[in-house]
Image: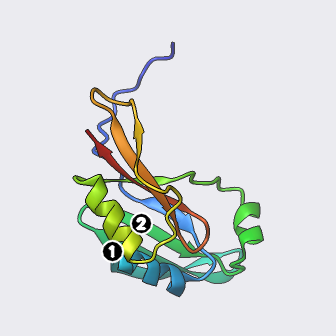
């Protein structure tokens, strides 16, 4: 086993998600209660892209649109892929009802139980405008 280095990590600072339409993605995350905390341009291969930091409490989602904002361009950039982002919730059933009633694309028919942690957990997923998977999870 390799030596573990002594780092103080406080938690997730942000999750970066490449998007194809920054305004559509911003509206999507706004519906989930996130607010635009920062918006700035950046340069990628000599062309202008856009970054928006969407914040809700201490959670930050970095949405960035590359100048050539297509799914093929996002995949070819080679930065990797986020499988899902999990949000901690206190009441999974209430969250599921609220999300379903709001018309989001919910993947599961109901919250799913897993025998994780001491007493298990329940989760469900939705998808965002570019297919990103957002998980809502309650540790029981």
Q: For the point 37% across and 74% down, which residue is it? A: 101
Q: Is residue 5 left or right of residue 69?
A: left
The span from disc 2 to disc 1 (Cα, nearest Å) is 8 Å
Which one is in front, 97 or 24? Answer: 97
Vertical arrangement, residue 115 with respect to residue 88, above or below = above
Q: Please name the residue that numbered disc 2 is placed on.
A: 61
Contact? badges 2 and 1 (CB < 8 Å)? yes
Residue that numbered label 1 is attached to: 34
Front-most of residues 11 and 107 = 107
The x and y percentages for residue 35 are 32, 79
Q: Residues within 10 Å of mark 2 (few under 14, many from 20)?
A: many
Q: Residue at x 53, y 84 (%)?
A: 24
Q: Mark 2, mark 1: which one is toward the viewer?
A: 1
Q: Is residue 62 left or right of residue 71?
A: left
> Helix, strand, or loop for circle 1?
loop
Residue 3 % position (x, y)? 45, 17
């Amino acid at each position: 086993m390799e030596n573990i280095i002594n780092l103080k990590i406080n938690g997730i600072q942000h999750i970066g998600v490449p998007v194809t339409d920054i305004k559509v993605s911003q509206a999507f995350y706004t519906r989930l209660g996130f607010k635009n905390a920062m918006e700035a341009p950046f340069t990628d291969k000599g062309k202008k892209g856009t970054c928006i930091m969407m914040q809700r409490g201490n959670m930050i989602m970095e949405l960035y649109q590359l100048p050539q904002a297509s799914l093929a361009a996002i995949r070819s950039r080679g930065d990797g892929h986020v499988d899902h982002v999990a949000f901690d919730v206190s009441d999974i059933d209430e969250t599921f009802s609220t999300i379903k009633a709001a018309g989001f694309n919910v993947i599961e028919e109901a919250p799913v139980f897993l025998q994780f942690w001491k007493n298990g957990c329940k989760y469900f997923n939705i998808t965002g405008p570019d297919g990103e998977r957002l998980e809502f999870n309650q540790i029981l």
